[in-house]
Amino acid sequence: MSLEAYLQIEGIPGETLSEGYENWIELQDFDLSASQTASATSTSAGGATSGRAYMSDMLVRKAVDNATPKLHEACCSGKHFKQVSVHLFRAGDPKVKYLEIKLEEVIISSFSLTGNGDQDNSFPSELIALNYGRIQLIYSKQSRKTGQSAGQIAGGWDAISNKIFS
């Protein structure tokens, strides 16, 4: 199953022509992770102790397009973005958005352009790192009977305040 995912950064239009996502940036892949420091030392409650959550930068890979120059510029200038969104879709007709990732207080912390010259029919791609202060993931359940949306489950984290973000 191939990935169908789109990225929206205010003021940096992409080239996708997908209905409803015109001018979003089409993604080839992404990586998002979080970790929690933990100690085997027991607390008075009996469990392991934990510390502050670590939120890694969200990495997104995309083909070179009209967004490339402005993404590079935003990285170099340290430009701040209030919100960045990523939408992921299940294949099908109609396609169904099943995951939305919202990032707040975002900067582009890294920009890397790769030529991919050793692969047939390859096109240069970019790896962009998005550093953020808050994240929210919204999963849309899909009815197995009808294929339609069957409610949402949301969760998030405020790395600035080190608390749940909803």
Image (tube, grey):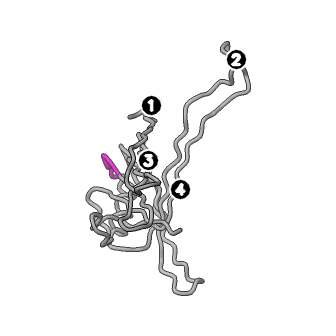
Is 109 part of what is drawn in magenta?
A: no
The residue wearing badge 4 is 31
Residue sitting at 48 percent across and 70 percent down? 113
**Distance from the alpha carbon under mark 1 to that under mark 2:** 23 Å
**Distance from the alpha carbon under mark 4 to that under mark 3:** 17 Å
Callout 3: 10 Å neighbours few (<14), some, many (20+)? some
Q: What kind of element bears circle 4?
A: strand
Q: Which residues are magenta?
A: 79-84
Among the 4 quarters of the image, the one containing residue 5: bottom left
Residue sitting at 55 percent across and 47 percent down? 33
Callout 2: 10 Å neighbours few (<14), some, many (20+)? few
Q: Amino acid at mark 2?
A: Gly
Q: Residue furthest top?
A: 44
The residue wearing badge 3 is 139
Callout 1: 10 Å neighbours few (<14), some, many (20+)? few
Instruction: Specify the label residue 164 is tagged with.
Output: 1
Of labels 2 and 4, the one closer to you? 2
Q: Amino acid at mark 4?
A: Asp
Of labels 4 and 3, the one closer to you? 3
Instruction: Work out whether mark 3 precedes mark 2 in sequence or the reverse, and give the earlier one.
Output: 2
**Distance from the alpha carbon under mark 1 to that under mark 4:** 21 Å
Callouts 4 and 3 close, C-beta under 8 Å: no
Residue 117, how many percent across, how many down?
A: 55, 83
Tell me if 159 is positioned left or right of 42 in this view: left
**Distance from the alpha carbon under mark 2 to that under mark 4:** 34 Å
The residue wearing badge 2 is 46
